[in-house]
Amino acid sequence: MLRYLHVRFKSFGYAMAGLLFLLKSEPHARIHLLATAVVVIAAIALDVARQDWLWLTVAITLVWVVEAINTAIEHLCDVVSPEHSQNVRRAKDVAAGAVLIAAIAAMTIGIIVFYPFIRALI
């Protein structure tokens, strides 16, 4: 049992190392971190409803997950094919496009959630 817990604990360490690498190596991840902080602070300050928190959480998580997968794909492609390859470029472009789709969806959710508050201020 202790061995099992030790192995599980080590896997969390590997996951944290991956997240730290993501933040250190990817400028877009740092932009996502800033956007996450702004959204969370705004949601707290505006006291958004529980249902809105659920949507914001889904949106934030979606962007982070897709960004992490995109980074993994890019690094794997660089190892598998260090020389220029049209197919590798396409794979990287599609992965980056997935991040863009997630970011647009998250922005749309953010607009829907925050629009009533912004409108009330205007």
Image: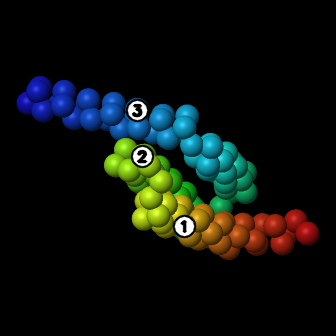
- Classed neighbour count for the residue bearing mark 1: other residues with Cα under 10 Å, few (<14), some (14–19), many (≥20): some
Which label's residue is closer to the chain start, 3 or 1?
3
Give the x, y percent position of residue 30.
62, 43
Q: Is residue 91 visible?
A: no
Residue sticking out furthest to the left:
1
Whether residues under marks 1 and 2 lie with C-beta atoms below 8 angstroms apart, the answer is no
Residue displayed at 88% across by 65% down: 121
* Quadrant into which the N terminus falls: top left
Which label's residue is closer to the chain start, 2 or 3?
3
Which label's residue is closer to the chain start, 1 or 2?
2
Q: How far apart are the alpha carbons under marks 1 and 2? A: 21 Å
Nearer the observer: mark 1 or 2; the answer is 2
Occupied quadrant, residue 52: bottom right
Residue marked by disc 1: 97
Whether residues under marks 2 and 3 lie with C-beta atoms below 8 angstroms apart, the answer is no
- Secondary structure, mark 3, is helix
Check the image and report above or below for 27 versus 70.
Answer: above
User: Quick check: 16 left or right of 114?
Assistant: left
Residue 17 has which mark? 3
Check the image and report above or below for 87 versus 69.
Answer: below
Residue marked by disc 2: 82
Give the x, y percent position of residue 36.
62, 50
- Classed neighbour count for the residue bearing mark 3: other residues with Cα under 10 Å, few (<14), some (14–19), many (≥20): few
Residue displayed at 54% across by 37% down: 25
* Quadrant into which the C terminus falls: bottom right
The kind of residue tagged 1 is Gly
Q: How far apart are the alpha carbons under marks 3 and 1? A: 25 Å
Q: Is residue 80 visible?
A: yes
